[in-house]
Image (tube, grey):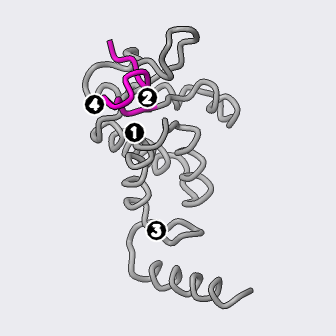
Amino acid sequence: MNFSTRINRFRIAILRMMSSEPLHRDTGKTLSEVIAQHPIELAYDAHALMHIVPVGRVCFGLKGDALTDYVRRSVRAMLESGGVPVTHVAGNGYDYTYEPKYGSTIDEITEGVVKEWLALPDDPLVLAGEGAWFARPDPKFPKWVKTD
């Protein structure tokens, strides 16, 4: 183990003693810090439950209600930052198209996404194909997200 790895592990151990929140097993970031990162991803690409759920499970060791709360908070953070649920519609000329099936308010969409996720089989391949995706419309790229 090299010196920087030892220092990072020491830093994470100190953070664990100081934080009441779960810490990311590799980076030492708190759960809230990681949730705050999800909207930042939307500036670069679409973001999906297939990116969020494994981080909660593997990197934070969450399960049950704690995992559901993490997913709910992550979805809400993306919606509050201007993200919208999207799907890909082949041949319509857009990368993504707004998906209205979850509802129209942040609360409705959040609960709709969480309800759908909880009903899916616990399989990463199913989550990759059927789990919700989010993107942020950007007027500089009018073909990125179709919202009408």
What residue would you read off at disc 4?
107
Given contact means CB atoms under 8 Å apart, are the residues at marks 4 and 2 in contact? no
- Give the main secondary structure of the magenta stretch: loop
What residue would you read off at disc 3?
29
- Which badge, 3 or 4, is on the more N-terminal residue? 3
| Label 1 residue SS | helix
Q: Is residue 138 visible?
A: yes
Three-letter amino acid code at disc 3?
Lys
**Residue at the (37%, 23%) spot, across then down:** 142
Q: What separation in Å lies between label 2 and label 3 (alpha carbons)? A: 25 Å
Of tags 1 and 4, the one toward the viewer is 1
| Label 2 residue SS | helix
Of tags 2 and 3, the one toward the viewer is 3
Whole-percent x, y for residue 42 in the image: 42, 41
Tell me the quarter of the image containing the N terminus. bottom right
Q: What separation in Å lies between label 1 and label 3 (alpha carbons)? A: 19 Å
**Residue at the (44%, 32%) spot, across then down:** 134
Given contact means CB atoms under 8 Å apart, are the residues at marks 1 and 2 in contact? yes
Tell me if residue 1 comes above or below residue 43 in the rendering: below
Three-letter amino acid code at disc 4?
Asp
Q: Is residue 142 magenta?
A: yes
Instruction: Give residue 113's mark.
Output: 2
How crowded pointer 4 is (Cα within 10 Å; few <14, some 14-19, many 20+) is rated as few
> Which contiguous range is marked in magenta?
134-148
| Label 4 residue SS | helix
Left or right placement of residue 56 versus residue 36 in this view? right
Of tags 3 and 4, the one toward the viewer is 3
- Which badge, 4 or 2, is on the more N-terminal residue? 4
Instruction: Give residue 75's mark.
Output: 1
Q: To which quarter of the image does residue 126 belong?
A: top right
